Image (tube, rainbow, N blue to C red):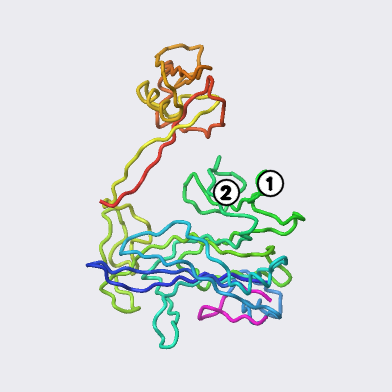
Amino acid sequence: PSPTTLHVLFAGERAGLLLLLVVVVVARVCVVHAASTMNDGLYTTSNGNPSSPTPYDTTYSSRPETEYFDVYSPPISTTYGQVYWRMMDEVALPPDLVERFDGSVMAVVGYEVDQVRLVDGGEEEVEVPVPITWAYNHHYGAWLTNGRMVRLVKQRRASDDHPEFRGRMEHGSTEFWLATPLQDGDTKSSYGTSPDEEIPLSHFFSEANGGEMRLSYHGYPAGYAQLIDSPTVFNIQPMQIDTWNRESSNAAYKPGGPLPRSSSIPSSAGYSGLIECPCSDRLEKKWWKTYDLCESSDGGGISDATECFKAARTIAQSPCYSDSITNDRNMPIGCIITQHDDGNIDVMWNSYDSDSAKVSKPIATPRKAEMSGSHIVAYASTAQVNV
């Protein structure tokens, strides 16, 4: 068995007038031989068996032949009010552990999570838990992976009920990370399986825990485990919110600190309004569109002929473009592109029933098509830039 514990390391540094919060995520995984509990306190469950004479034991050390290992993420540096939410660089598992499970199966029976900072303890660094009022863990997603056979690849989801998107907290994003086989033409599940197609090569861990992450139980009943073949690397995608009021010099929480105008949390609430993710007017949002081809179109989010002609030149190179406008009820509406054998391209904007081609109209994910007679669709994109 092997649980995975996520630890986050923070250290305060002064840079100019800004106090940086430096975070590192650590993962603890339990594998067969006495394992201790990482966080102070007891894990409890709310749905225990009332007829059982013995309550369910959530201590990993009570399980025979269970041991653990810890993995630390790269550091995260933030200032007050900043949100860190991205996939971090992969971290290699301890070499002796990789060698031990090379060609064999690890059984993960649970994992634990913490946020810590490393301080000078004399001969070695010492882990000190970071108050949740300094760095609020909104949620996280973590992976154990056989890095020799699969890798995490960013995928575009086709819909909210995409079977391999469910349970991944991307908060409306059109993209998500998925463990994908490295071999070209491999038809196995994108979750990754070993050659006998029974033992997974990757596991995704995420229970949507926020501030309650430390003492939320992430263990499995006796006789159950998540099996993984020859794990080598660990990945984590944390969402951390820097809520540390810099007037607090120690672990004691001191309410206060500036909030965006959109925050509805009163100063008397006893917690930072930043954990509700209010929108800030200090970040300038810049919008643009990217374009692609599809087999059919209802307008595809392109609003007029000018945008149509511009879009065609971003996705199809030609020595000669021929632009035209029509209003034909017998043709598909929107932006149509046709490439001839000599490389010349005809771009046509059909404005018939133009109300159905508004940018605000939902856009279905297109299928790839040959360029001849294809329609151009638009994707709206945004970037947040410090100003």
What's the residue at 32%, 52% (across, down)? 279
Left/right placement of residue 30 relative to residue 249 reads: right
Disc 1 element: loop
Q: Name the residue nearer the viewer: 164 or 336.
A: 336
Q: Which residue is mark 2?
A: 165
The answer to whether 161 is drawn above or below residue 85 in the figure is above
* x and y percentages locating residue 89 in the rendered image: 49, 60
Residue at the farthest left position: 17
Out of 263 and 247, give the one closest to the viewer. 247
Residue 98: % across, % down:
64, 69
As for residue 34 lying within the magenta part, the answer is yes
Check residue 186 in the rendering and tell me which mark sits there, or answer none: 1
Farthest residue, direction bottom: 122
The residue mark sitting in front, 1 or 2, is 1
x then y, percent, for residue 165: 57, 48
Residue 160 picture quarter: top right
- Report the span colored magenta: 30-43
Question: What secondary structure predominates along the stretch shown in magenta?
Answer: loop
Q: Residues within 10 Å of mark 1 (few under 14, many from 20)?
A: few
Say what amino acid the circle numbered 2 marks: Phe
